[in-house]
Image (cartoon, rainbow, N blue to C red):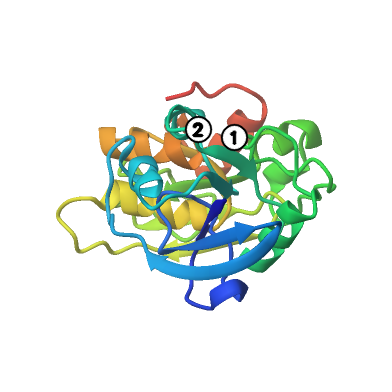
Amino acid sequence: MKIGIPVIDENGMDSTLSEHFGRTAFYVFADVEDNKIEKIELVRNPFEQHGPGQIPNWVAENGVDTMIVKGIGTRAITFFTNLGIKVVKATGDTAKDCLEDYLSGKTDDTDPACNHNHSQGHEHQGHEASEKSETCKKKYGTVALTVKDKSLDAQTDERFARGKYIVIINGENGTVEFLENNPVEEHGVGPKMIGTLANKGVKTIIAKSLGQNATLAAQEAGITAYEAEDGSGNENLEKLWSGKLKAL
C-alpha cells in the first residue's frame, strides 16, 4: 500500500498537513507493508496551477492507492475514486499523526469532502456580526472576503484576488486577520489566492465574482463561494450568516 498526504513544508514525517490537497507545496508518499511504514518520500507538487484531474492522475502514476486529506471537493474525490484511489479524511496536524491514526484505525469516518469540525464548539467574538446565530456560523466555518480598507466596515472590493485587503474571520474563535494584497502576477492570481486561503482554513468566501480557474480551485479545495452584495464587509457577513447571500 502507498499512502499520499499533502503537506506545506519539508520536515519529513513532521511536515504540517495542508488544508488543500491540490494547491499544496509537497506530498509525503509512504510505502506501507504489514501495517508498518517501510519508506517515506517527500515530493514537491509539480503543478503551480492544475486543471481538473491532473493531480489525481499524477498521484496514481506515483503508485498511490490511498490519499489522506483535510480539504477536498466532491469533484476531486470522484477523480480519485475513478482511478481506484481511496480518499480518507485526515485527523492529525502532521503527516506522522495522519499515518499513525490511519494505521491504527483511528481515522475520521465522516465524509472527506466535509471540512467542518463537528467535535469542537465554536465561539465567535471580536466583531458585531459574530454575535448572531451560532448554528449558522458553524455551517460556514472560517470566512474570507475582500474589502477596500483595513476594516470590516469598509466596502467590499469587487476584485476578489486583486482587492486591497483580504479579511479572514476565524471560524473557531472569531478573530479577524487582514492581509494586505498586492499581487504582481498578470495571470493565475485567483487560483493562487484560493490556495492561500485554503491553507489558512477558509471554508467560505464572499466575492462579487470568480474566474473559471479560481472557481475550479475553490471546488477542489472544498471552499464554497457566495456572491457579495454592495455594502460593507460586516453587512455581507450578516447576510451570509442569515442565509441571504446567493451561492456563486
- SS class of the residue under badge 2? helix
Q: Position of residue 180 (x, y in %)?
A: 40, 65
Q: In this view, does 142 lie above or below 137?
A: below
Other residues around mark 2 within 10 Å, as few (<14) / some (14–19) / many (≥20): many
> Which-is-in-front pick, marks 2 and 1?
2
Judging by the rendered image, the residue that carries numbered circle 1 is 113
Given the image, on which type of amino acid does mark 1 rest? Ala
Give 21 or 137, whichever is nearer the viewer: 21
Structural distance between the alpha carbons of marks 2 and 1 = 8 Å
What secondary structure is marked by label 1?
loop
* Left or right for 235, reference 96: left
Give residue 148's mark: none
Which is more N-terminal, label 1 or label 2? 2
Q: Name the residue under label 2.
A: 77
Give residue 83's position: percent from left, percent from top.
43, 32
Quadrant of res 19: bottom right
The relative height of residue 83 versus residue 103 in the rendered view (above or below) is above
Label 1 Cα crowd, 10 Å radius (few <14 / some 14-19 / many 20+): many
Residue 231: % across, % down: 46, 36
> In front: 9, or 231?
9
Q: In this rendering, would 151 be left or right of 43?
A: right
Q: Which of 226 and 236 is in front in this view?
A: 226
Circles 2 and 1, Cβ within 8 Å, touching? The answer is: yes
